[in-house]
Image (spheres, coloured by chain):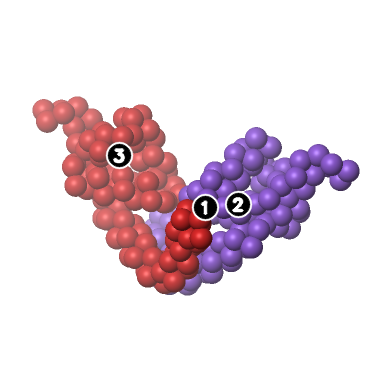
Chain colours: A red, B purple
Amino acid sequence: MLGPGKADLLAGIRDTGSISAAGRAMSMSYKRAWSLVEEMNAAFGTPLVISSRGGAQGGGAHLTEAGEAVLSHYRTLEQRALAAGSEQIEAIAALLDDMSEGK
Amino acid sequence: MLGPGKADLLAGIRDTGSISAAGRAMSMSYKRAWSLVEEMNAAFGTPLVISSRGGAQGGGAHLTEAGEAVLSHYRTLEQRALAAGSEQIEAIAALLDDMSEGK
């Protein structure tokens, strides 16, 4: 329902004001970016992203209050998870390093 | 390089002694399960999984010491991340619940 890709897409929409620009910055097709936004809006039962297609300025998109809240909680979650798991991440990285050096 | 799917596959191989049985339990094709194992073995530069094809007992697979270590670190990482992020997970879940109830 929410993962790193969707969180980055929300952040991109917040920063660019556009679903297609946010998708492009992630090398994602227009169709894929819209599809992820629609999935999130449906999953939460209220829009996280509001978009207006067309119009004088060619449309645009922005995060709703719910969208901002979800993104903010997710970013805090990522930071806390990374901090809490730093020992294990280092241990796995050490196994990768040792082995790629043939130790 | 390592995520929930690959970790579950390692655990399945440890428990079943078979790459194909572990994949099947995850509704994964034989080809996909082998491909993930090969990816992990290549990424770590040493095998996490050793398999023997054919033979009297139809082959089998087991985790190496490195495979056991990687799986163990990953499971601890998951537990710590979940515990550290529990407030945020609850906050996101609360947004899901409130909205699906139309509040």
Q: Secondary structure at mark 1?
A: helix
Q: Residues within 10 Å of mark 2 (few under 14, many from 20)?
A: many
Residue B44, numbered label: 1
Instruction: Indicate left or right for B2 with A72 as reference.
Output: right
User: Do tag 1 and tag 2 residues touch (Cβ < 8 Å)?
Assistant: yes
Q: Secondary structure at mark 2?
A: loop
Residue A56 falls in image quadrant: top left
- Disc 3: which residue: A26
- Give the CA separation, mark 3 to mark 2: 33 Å
- Disc 2: which residue: B47
Report if residue B57 is visible in the image.
Answer: yes
Residue B94, numbered label: none
Indicate the amino acid at tag 2: Pro
Q: From what the image shows, is residue A27 above or below residue B61?
A: above
- Give the CA separation, mark 3 to mark 1: 27 Å
Residue furthest toward the right? B56
Nearer to me, B88 or A87: A87
Residue B27 falls in image quadrant: top right
